[in-house]
Image (tube, helix red, strand yellow):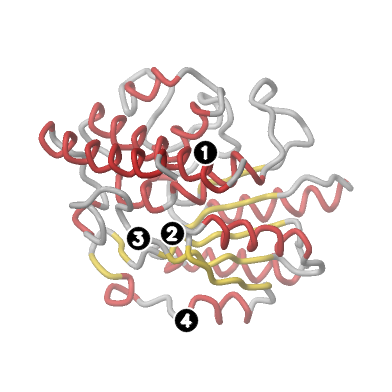
């Protein structure tokens, strides 16, 4: 896909995120919207996947370590054809496919169940090590939140990944600078994030997480990096694309009501119309 097509797909993903959360009346819009461009690029451009065969042995793996932003993952999986888009309207409903956190046993395309923050990267590291030990060439991608990296388990996993030179692993940090209680710098500062990953023997790239040219260049560089894992620190805007949600910690875990939903969708329609003029 070219850059414009990726931008249009990301905007559609944001519409799905907002719509599914409005239908659920609960969930996490802020981080889902901030991660939408990164997730779009992974599934449309980067990863070797086959929606017709979700468990294909040589597929690339994706672990959503910050599992509460499942609406972003579900949206892109539906867009790629893993399941009907109508399922998005059943988000968080009892007995339905799409629960509040990803469930690998219940949802096609989900490579790992996620819940407690900090655990996903450990699973991703295990997947990457497995590929190395078995001589397989699939790559593993994991998305973390910047609040999530306050968890100590993240750094245990990073230390192991760097020690084992897992160059088939890419750790992406959605650095929107906000978590449920406010600024990550105020709650428990993880900064400087890049220096911390370098200390654990990672190749580190810091980019604008909404710039598809920068995203593309970063993943290309990660592919060429040998002998060490890569960490991509993606600077993003929490609530990206929805005017009243942007840079507001209060939208970490709250669903829009009917009036707010209408405003959000109007915002995203304007973005879509502008993209169609390009």
Q: Which mark is residue 237?
A: 3
State the image coordinates of residue 36 (x, y, percent, origin top left). 44, 47
State the image coordinates of residue 251 (x, y, percent, origin top left). 22, 51
Real-space Cα distance between discs 2 and 1?
16 Å
The reply to whether the C-beta atoms of the residues labelled 2 and 1 are less than 8 Å apart is no
The residue tagged 1 is: 113
Q: Which circle's residue, 1 or 3, is located before the other in the chain?
A: 1
Residue in view at x 50 percent, y 62 percent: 173
Q: Which mark is residue 192?
A: 4
Disc 3: CA contacts within 10 A as few (<14), some (14-19) or many (>=20): many
Image quadrant occupied by the N terminus: top right
Q: Which circle's residue, 2 or 3, is located before the other in the chain?
A: 2
Farthest residue to the front: give it: 277
The residue tagged 2 is: 145
Q: In the image, is residue 216 above or below residue 113?
A: below
Residue in view at x 17 percent, y 40 percent: 263
């Amino acid at each position: 896909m070219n850059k414009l097509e990726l931008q249009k797909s990301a905007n559609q993903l944001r519409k799905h995120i907002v719509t599914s959360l409005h239908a659920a009346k609960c969930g996490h819009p802020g981080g889902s919207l901030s991660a939408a461009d990164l997730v779009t690029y992974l599934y449309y451009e980067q990863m070797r996947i086959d929606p017709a065969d979700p468990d294909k042995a040589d597929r690339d793996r994706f672990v959503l370590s910050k599992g509460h932003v499942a609406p972003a993952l579900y949206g892109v999986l539906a867009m790629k054809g893993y399941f009907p888009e109508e399922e998005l309207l059943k988000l968080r409903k009892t007995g339905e496919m799409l629960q509040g956190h990803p469930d690998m046993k219940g949802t096609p395309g989900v490579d790992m169940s996620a819940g407690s923050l900090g655990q996903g990267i450990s699973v991703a590291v295990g997947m990457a090590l497995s590929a190395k030990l078995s001589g397989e060439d699939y790559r593993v991608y994991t998305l973390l939140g910047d609040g999530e990296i306050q968890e100590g388990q993240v750094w245990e996993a990073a230390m192991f990944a760097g020690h084992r030179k897992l160059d088939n692993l890419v750790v992406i940090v959605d650095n929107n600078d906000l978590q449920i209680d406010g600024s990550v710098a105020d709650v428990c500062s993880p900064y400087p994030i890049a220096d911390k990953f370098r200390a654990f023997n990672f190749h580190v790239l810091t980019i604008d997480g909404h710039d598809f040219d920068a995203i593309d260049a970063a993943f290309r560089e990660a592919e060429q990096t040998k002998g060490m894992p890569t960490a991509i620190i993606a600077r993003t805007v929490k609530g990206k694309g929805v005017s009243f949600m942007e840079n507001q910690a209060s939208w970490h875990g709250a669903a829009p009501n009917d009036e707010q939903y209408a405003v959000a969708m109007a915002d995203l329609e304007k973005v879509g119309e502008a993209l169609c003029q390009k």
